Image (cartoon, helix red, strand yellow):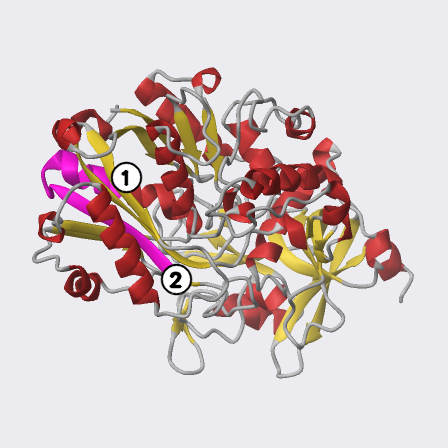
């Protein structure tokens, strides 16, 4: 199930980034024992199987922990992003960004839902929006 | 099981350069200066060194260093992964070598120009060499150690009601200890809690500038050998009474986002449990505590994990004065990595050695048990 990416490198995680282009948040699920795993790895740590498929997350979860970086930042991080660990409903924890909320309103355990966007170079990334603002259509 | 310590490994010599922000000389020269000082401190000649250990990210090649020192042949070498959290691991590698007979006298070294040269705290692409167009961490803004670690610490703050000001109380103590350590960069420069609170945010709401370890130029080295040499040494030998590493699946370099509960430090707890079992020494027996601190919050997590106070209690434990010189458990008596220098935490092992020898600038009278903690690793030093 390895994919060959641009440049010829064999990458275990190509499915994940490809999924984002289709607005799908995909995680590995072992074809033999059914264990869902993240971070992305070639072998199932539970049963040793190399066979796996994907399961699609609902993209709904809560903010477990978060930061706002002030210094030093990469030049393209303007304004600085809120970085969060999101607990997805499926029991997966994912590093992502949170948008649509001012940092002084940011809080642990708020409900969030996934959003997708083009970084500008054709690479699609995930980020999360507060459920309140997502429902409001902002 | 107490391997590899059971065979009797000791620290025979220590050496260091000055700690600065701009050494004005190459990293190899720093390594050579610190290493030669350590070898002479051990009463050895360079040709008696037959093993070397450093970090995978140290730039100083073992044979280049050998040429400078006059080391004639190496029977053992190894390099430990990670940065500062691997500091104890270098000692463990050396102890394993001398107690197994693979080598007789092992030089451990770490030297860099981490302020005037490559600065680890700046946004840096992932080090795995893949040059990925996307990365599950870096791409989302985790491009400095401050951000990577702060994302862990924030949950601890949330669950236990810890404020940035509480972290500042540690920094004040570290700088107080550095102020009376002539080798410290911040010698004679203590700070107040107001100074801490006035320093700018690095990662809000967790880390201000004064919560971050220094960026330092400098080199440190130790010589590890077997305890039958102890009586012949010019300086008091220091026993490596217990050493552990503690790494769990799903972890990363001294952080682990994937535990159900990340408001603690289970790796550190396991590291402590191992050395306490090896030595029969408990937290109550420790006279001096050296804690690796890339950032101030990790002191709190380690105080709790190593059993010096309960979970969530570190802020009160520190505020009550327990970690100061003269307190219940003097902590980072050299000023730590915030106050003395950031030589990837190996300088903390040198301070632990001085405390057992009785030669530290801020000497704790009669220190017989020093715990050097690197998060996912622990080392107990005692007199040989």
Left or right, residue A26 beside residue B271: right
Asked whether the viewer can see residue A56, the reply is no
Lateral position of residue B127 relative to residue A27, left or right: left
Residue shown at the point (53%, 35%) measured from the top left: B265
The answer to whether marks 1 and 2 sit on the same chain is: yes
Circle 2 residue: B112
Please, what secondary structure does the residue beneath circle 1 have?
helix
Q: Chain of mark 1?
A: B
Give, as a single range, the part of the protein colored magenta: B92-112
Q: Quadrant of residue A98?
A: bottom right
Drawn side of residue A118 relative to residue B20, left or right: right
- Would you name the residue on which mark 1 appears? B92
Q: Which mark is residue B169?
A: none
Q: Which corner quadrant holds the N terminus of chain B?
A: top left
Quick check: B207 left or right of B15?
right
- Whole-percent x, y for residue B176 in the image: 61, 39
Residue B143 within the magenta-colored segment of the rendering: no
Residue shown at 56% from the left, 66% from the top: B122
């Amino acid at each position: 199930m390895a994919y060959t990416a641009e440049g010829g490198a064999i990458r275990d995680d190509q499915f994940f980034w490809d999924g984002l282009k289709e607005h799908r948040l995909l995680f590995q699920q072992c074809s033999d024992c059914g264990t869902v795993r993240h971070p992305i790895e070639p072998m199932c740590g539970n049963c040793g199987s190399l066979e796996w498929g994907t399961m699609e997350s609902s993209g709904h979860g809560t903010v477990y922990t978060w930061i706002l970086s002030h210094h030093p930042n990469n030049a393209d991080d303007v304004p600085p992003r809120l970085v969060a660990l999101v607990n997805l409903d499926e029991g997966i924890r994912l590093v992502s960004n949170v948008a649509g909320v001012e940092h002084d309103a940011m809080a642990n355990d708020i409900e969030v839902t996934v959003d997708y966007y083009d970084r500008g170079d054709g690479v699609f990334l995930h980020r999360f929006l507060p459920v309140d603002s997502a429902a409001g259509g902002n | 099981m107490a391997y590899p310590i059971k065979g009797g490994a000791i620290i025979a010599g220590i050496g260091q350069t000055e700690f600065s922000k701009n050494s004005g000389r190459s990293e190899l020269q720093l390594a050579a200066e610190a290493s030669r000082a350590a070898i002479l401190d051990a009463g050895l000649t360079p040709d008696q060194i037959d093993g070397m250990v450093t970090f995978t990210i140290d730039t100083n090649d073992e044979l280049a260093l050998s040429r400078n020192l006059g080391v004639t042949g190496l029977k053992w070498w190894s390099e430990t992964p990670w940065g500062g959290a691997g500091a104890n691991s270098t000692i463990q590698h050396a102890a394993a070598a001398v107690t197994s007979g693979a080598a007789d006298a092992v030089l451990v070294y770490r030297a860099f120009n981490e302020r005037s040269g490559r600065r680890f705290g700046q946004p840096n692409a992932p080090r795995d060499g893949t040059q990925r167009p996307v990365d599950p961490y870096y791409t989302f803004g985790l491009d400095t150690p401050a951000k990577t670690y702060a994302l862990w610490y924030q949950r601890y703050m949330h669950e236990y009601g810890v404020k940035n000001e509480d972290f500042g109380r540690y920094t004040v103590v570290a700088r107080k200890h550095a102020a009376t350590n002539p080798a410290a960069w911040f010698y004679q420069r203590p700070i107040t809690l107001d100074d801490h609170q006035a320093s700018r945010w690095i990662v809000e709401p967790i880390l201000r500038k004064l919560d971050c370890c220094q960026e330092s130029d400098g080199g440190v080295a130790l010589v590890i050998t077997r305890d039958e040499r102890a009586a012949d040494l010019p300086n008091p030998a220091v026993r490596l009474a217990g050493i552990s590493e503690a790494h769990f699946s799903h972890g990363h370099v001294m952080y682990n986002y994937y535990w159900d509960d990340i408001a603690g430090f289970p790796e550190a707890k396991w590291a402590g449990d191992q050395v306490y079992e090896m030595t029969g020494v408990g937290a109550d027996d420790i006279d001096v505590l050296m804690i690796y601190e890339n950032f101030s919050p990790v002191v709190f997590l380690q105080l709790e994990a190593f059993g010096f106070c309960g979970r969530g209690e570190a802020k009160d434990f520190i505020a009550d004065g327990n970690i100061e010189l003269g307190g219940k458990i003097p902590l980072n008596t050299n000023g730590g990595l915030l106050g003395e220098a950031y030589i990837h935490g190996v300088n903390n092992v040198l301070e632990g050695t001085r405390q057992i020898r009785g030669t530290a600038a801020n000497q704790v009278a009669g220190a017989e048990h020093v715990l050097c903690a690197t998060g996912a690793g622990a080392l107990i030093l005692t007199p040989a």
